[in-house]
Amino acid sequence: MSPEAMMQSWMTGLKSLDEFREKFVAGLAGRGRRSHSGGRRHKIMIARVLLAALALGPWLSAVAAADTASEALAKFGLIGTWAAECREPASPANPYIQFVAVPDGTVTRQTLLGEGEAPVANVIESAQAESGDRLLTRERNSSGVVLQIDVAKVAGGIRVMSSKGSDGREPIKNGILTGNGRPTAILTKCSGP
């Protein structure tokens, strides 16, 4: 787990950065008082803790304010069903991609390949807007492989620009399918908010 993800999960439930600072400083100051009551070392330790809390403030604010995957996908406009050709049924040649957010905050990306084909589902663990037209997602597939996927808004829809797996595979690079050298499809929104 990345340091940012660990910090975000640890901070879940804290109402503000000020509450974090209070708990952090109070906890360390309390320990310091028990072991170095009133001494010079105690004052130096408190000063260092306060400086660290102030230095970490902007970083912790960014982590605390970070969108959940569900919020990031909703802001980017991805929640819903996407396809290269919405008027045609889902098939291996025209897969439907569904971004689904459930009330518990879980988000999945499901690939529907048509009748008789099992859907492929990934859990989106995190998503971060890189700009107004780029979104990076971290997804885990059913085999446990973690995928880093870069999605771009383009005229008329979205397009996957890169996909790299924790297994070392990189099926999409610079908007090109590495297996056949063709550009990735532009997907349009078929349904959804």
Image: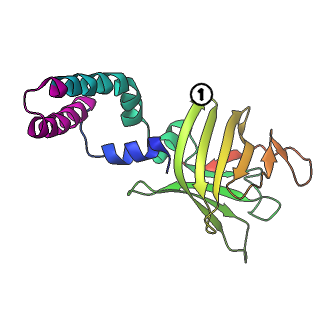
Q: Main secondary structure of the magenta part?
A: helix
Q: Position of residue 169 (x, y in %)?
A: 77, 55
Up the image or down, 40 lies above or below 116; here it is: above
* Amino acid at circle 1: Gly
| Secondary-structure class at tag 1 | loop
In the image, residue 65 lies in the stretch drawn in magenta: no
Q: Position of residue 188 (x, y in %)?
A: 70, 44
Which residue carries the number 1 mark? Answer: 132
Residue at the (38%, 33%) spot, across then down: 65
Extreme-bottom residue of the structure: 116
Residue at the (9%, 40%) spot, across then down: 34
Q: Nearer the viewer, residue 71 or 112?
A: 71
Task: Give the quadrant of residue 93.
Answer: bottom right
- Answer few, some or many: residues within 10 Å of disc 1's Cα (few below 14, many 20 plus, some between 14 and 19): few
Q: Position of residue 133 (x, y in %)?
A: 64, 30
In the image, residue 31 lies in the stretch drawn in magenta: yes
Residue range (magenta): 17-42
Q: Nearer the viewer, residue 52 or 58?
A: 52
